Image (spheres, rainbow, N blue to C red):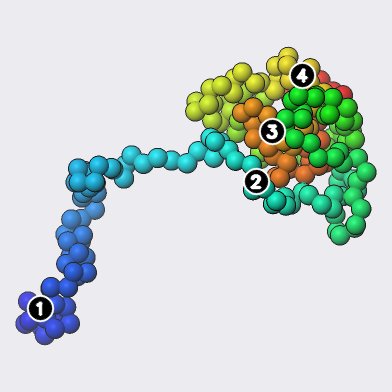
Amino acid sequence: MLRRFGLAAAFPIRRPGIVAALLLAGLGSGACVPLDDFMAAVFGRSMRDQPSFDPYENTLLPPEGSVPFAAGNYPAGPFEVNIGQPEGSPDVPPPFTQLEMTSRPEVVDSLTNPVPASPESLARGEELYERVCIVCHGPDGSGTTGYIFEVHPALAAYPLRGDAAVARSDGYLYGIIRVGRALMPAYGHQIGHYDRWHVVNYVRRLQGVGAN
């Protein structure tokens, strides 16, 4: 047929790419499963059963020496934007590590929440909570309503509304957001200084208590 229309020279059937294209076209749309079965039999793996990446499993801290967007010039107030002023807020605590926070809780327990739990703060805290925290802690802070609870049922052991979390100081909750603890990774590189306090205020509302 190709020779009849003078196309044999332009489309020689011996070209591997043309053969592969014709073969795939002939298989049709319903051939994915048999083809996948064949590949699984030959190579021992199937496209239908591939490992997936869980961003909440084996979380990693930012590379050493990296600079998070919230570092450096902090804004001078909870609802201000830093536009290059050389000095930020005087209430930013000095750096501390997760080990320091857990071995010496007074490092963070001594921190005073500089952000009143105003409607504006609670609204900002809710926005950040639903953006960053809700996937693990759930909309009500119970852990069991978290979106990944079925994958990580251990979240039920760390409810934000539990007695242990309620008894923690605002500074301790701030510290956990900043440097992480146990199953929770650090979010200091994603959530800025004042935004962490907004989240603390919102968590206190979920707990049914006022900021302390």
Label 1 environment density (alpha carbons within 10 Å; few <14, some 14–19, many ≥20): few
Tell me the SS state at disc 3.
Answer: loop
Q: Nearer the viewer, mark 1 or mark 4?
A: 4
Between 103 and 166, the one lying in front of the other is: 103
Q: Nearer the viewer, mark 2 or mark 1?
A: 2
* Image side of residue 1 versus residue 56, left or right: left
Please say whether residue 132 is visible from this viewpoint: yes
Question: Which residue is label 2 attached to?
Answer: 62
Question: Which residue is label 4 attached to?
Answer: 166
Residue at left offset 79%, top offset 17%: 167
Q: Nearer the viewer, mark 3 or mark 1?
A: 3
Seen in the picture, residue 17 relative to 134 is either above or below; the reply is: below
Type of residue at label 3?
Gly
Find residue 2 and name its label.
1
Question: Which residue is label 3 attached to?
Answer: 180
Q: Are marks 2 and 1 in contact (CB under 8 Å)?
A: no
Q: Nearer the viewer, mark 2 or mark 4?
A: 2
Type of residue at label 4?
Val
